[in-house]
Amino acid sequence: MIKKLLTSALLVGSFASSAFAGEHWNVDLGGVSMKFLSMPVSARSAALSGAGVADPARVSEASRNPLAMSTVKNAEFGVSQLIFGEHRADNFISAYYGIPFTISNYKVAASATIDFVGYDNIEGRDEYGNLTTEYGAFAWSIQAGLGSQGEVFNWGANIRLAQQTIDDESAIAFLGDIAGSFKVNQYFAFAATLTNFGFMGDYDGVDEAEPMALQAGISGFFPIAEKWNAHVSADAYRRADTDAYWLFGGEVNYLKTLSFRMGYAIRPNTKNAISCGLGIAFSMIVFDYGYSPKPALQAGDHYITLGLKF
């Protein structure tokens, strides 16, 4: 079994190295557009610093991790709100829906997501640096996804249409996500995702690069008391315009009603910080909160996710 896993990992690594050797996988630092598509949306993901690709918990994470559809046991509708710190966007809101169903005794789940982010009162400047009129910017995306609900192997895929407008210029993108996971036993799982690959338009004749990213990780699940358990995750992440960095996250759960979370990200040339959050489930209502500090801006972002299962 170990030999098969290592061989598979080497083959996947070789394929990824070849597939991502081109210009779209080696963009200058900060050179991708529509970066909001690579930001955490769900409060749980933010609290874990983005770690846990092998350990999704709810369909609210499906817009960034297609494997979240493997967790959908009941239909769920919800909204995630990101409250930015100073000097950031004015609004980022996401609505999601997920539903499980069966096709010829094969369990799957579908999801749909809408994201919107907006900026107001941006200072305008001419080519000489002089102030001009203020302007705004906004971006949105709509997404549909499908994923399996197996006991050992799972897959997930998303398709996405997105548009970003800055002042009077707009660009559009048709993107996709794919993901796969393998649960070794009741204690460990591996997973990998490739997100935001596809076609991206240009701004006024200038080519733009999509925020394509690869994430792979391992998660462990351990009982620590009669009604308590712990989840720990370690992931590697790389976006097309960044160096690779590490994401770590941990979660302590009491039954299925209360969760305490913490995360840490090690990013090159960036100040690191600890994120945190909690989750509460009460009957049909689920609530998650996450805090992600931004040391470089001396501020932090607050994430709130509220869902209703039915």
Image (tube, grey):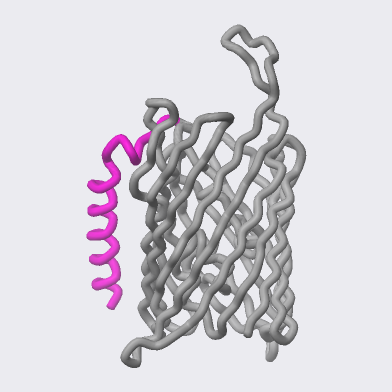
Q: Which residue is at 72% across, 86% downward?
A: 283
Residue 12, percent from left and from top: 27, 59
x then y, percent, for residue 239: 44, 45
Q: Is residue 271 magenta?
A: no
Q: Nearer the viewer, residue 218 or 99?
A: 99
Vertical side of 23 occupied by 63: above or below: below
Q: Is residue 129 left or right of residue 106?
A: right
Q: Which residues are magenta?
A: 1-28
Q: Is residue 157 left or right of residue 63?
A: left
Camera sees residue 229: yes
Image quadrant where residue 167 sits: top right
Determine the residue located farthest toward the front in the rendered image: 168
Q: Quadrant of the C terminus?
A: bottom right
Q: Residue at x 42, y 30 (%)?
A: 28
Secondary structure predominantly adopted by residues drawn in magenta = helix
Q: Quadrant of residue 180?
A: bottom left
Q: Can see residue 260?
A: no
In the figure, is residue 227 to the left or right of 36?
right
At horizontal 27% and vertical 38% (from top left) the residue drawn is 22
